[in-house]
Amino acid sequence: MKKIAKILILALVMAIAVPKTYAQVSFGVGVTVGIAPPPLPVYVQPPCPVYGYLWEPGYWAWDDDYGYYWVPGVWVAPPDPGFYWTPPYWGFEDGVYGFYAGYWGPEVGFYGGINYGFGYCGYGFGGGRWVGDRFSYNTAVVNVNRTFIHNTYNDPSVTRNSYTTSRTGFNGRGGVNVRPRSEELAAMRMRHDPPTSSQVAHQQMARSNRSQFAVVNHGDPAAAAMNRVNGRSFNTRGHIANMARANTMASRRFAANRTRIAHTVNSARIAKNQRAVNAARIVRNQRAANAARVARNQRTANAARLARNQRAANAARIARNQRAANAARVARNQRTANAARVARNQRTANAVRVARNQRAANAARVARNQRAANVARVARNQRAANAAQVARNQRAANNIERYQQRRAQPTPQRQAQQMRVQPRQAAPQQRIQPQRAMQQPRSNSRPAQRERRG
């Protein structure tokens, strides 16, 4: 039942708590209480018993029956070479104190800025470093016996990493108010291993010892540190502690103060239950508020979706109408362009046809004119030729007639010749004269030429 109650309380608290960046990644809040842990005790570190062991600083843990108890600091063996221990811490948030468990990893993560000492000064770890598979101890802050541990060095500057010199045992308001650095955030995202079985057994052993509870020791535990798990216990002054005697005395004080312890524990339990009830009520209210917000958001989302759909439908309708109008306009423009093109083509064809017809008519008119001109020229030429022929013929006739006339006129020579000619010869000449007259045009130019020459 206690475990179930723890789980429920943890679920309720984590449901209403806002996650912080400084919460551990691998191992989160394991326990939440309403009482602050006591201050860290100041104690002496025992020497390292075995080479290779690392120091786990002491811390306050919680028991549901008797409250806080001190887990002594102890030298423990790491699970693997190269691993460092990140201590647990208490963190205050939303009115409760939550416990963040420690873990092993290749780098030291955030442990609340708590100054545990011995290399854990609030940031990182300065108590030593791994060099390959071998660990080297910083003797400035850890206690080692250098007679048999030789891998050591001395660097007192690691104390500068301390956030505070107080012994406050929790992070948050009223404690150490720091946030993780980038290196610590990176380390929290690396591989993490839980505490080893010997570390868990060490915590259970401290829980079974009455002298370790704060209600008995009032912040001064009988065993502040141990040299190893199930080894020797040392008090705050570094002396070996008699745990049996301290446990007997603590049991007597438990019996004497049982009522007060029970009252304190009951008060803490009542406060825790009240916080659980408050947390449950807050969770219910938060769920109701979340449901109302979700409903509002859903209505808003539905309204927005409807508005988007309406806008999309309107836009689609407008786009369709626009496309239809554009298509109609394009069709009208296309028809107008086609009609204009057809008209232009028709006009062009008509103009071409008219031009062809005009050219044909012009050619026909020119041909007719040419033929008429040719005919007229031929006629003119013919008439000219005819007139020339007629003129030639007329001249020839005239020449013949003049020749005949001249020949017909008697001359002294001709008369003398005619007188010598026989009368019988005169008749034949008269008969032959017409033939010579017919042949006269062939040589009609000679008398004229002789005449012109004479």
Image (spheres, rainbow, N blue to C red):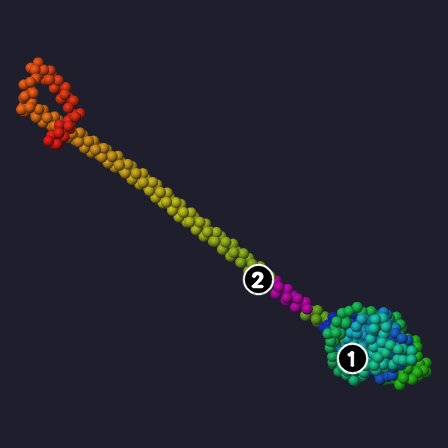
The picture quadrant where one finds residue 365 is top left
Q: Callout 1 environment at 10 Å: few (<14), some (14 to 19), or many (20+)?
A: many
Between 286 and 333, the one lying in front of the other is 333
**166 shown above or below 198:** below
Q: Answer with mark 1 or mark 2, whichever residue precedes in sequence.
A: 1
**Can you name the residue that lies furthest to the bottom here?**
237
Res. 163 visible in picture: yes
Q: Nearer the viewer, mark 1 or mark 2?
A: 1
Helix, strand or loop for disc 2: helix
Residue 71, percent across and down? 86, 78
- Give the Cα separation between the discs numbered 1 and 2: 56 Å
Question: What amino acid does circle 1 point to?
Answer: Gly
**Does the stretch in magenta take in 287?**
no
Residue in the picture at 58% in, 59% down:
309
Query: What stretch of residues is rendered in magenta?
Result: 290-303
Image x and y of residue 438, in percent: 15, 21
Question: Which residue is painted at 82% across and 79% down in the image?
Answer: 119
Q: Picture coordinates of residue 390 (x, y %)?
A: 16, 29
Q: Which residue is identified by label 1?
A: 122
Q: Which mark, residue 307?
A: 2
Helix, strand, or loop for circle 1? loop
Closer to us: 135 or 221: 135
**What type of secondary structure mainly makes up the magenta span?**
helix
**Where is residue 354 drawn, in percent x and y?**
33, 42
Q: Is residue 241 above or below residue 196?
A: below
Residue sitting at x 93%, y 83%: 240
* Image side of residue 317 versus residue 437, left or right: right
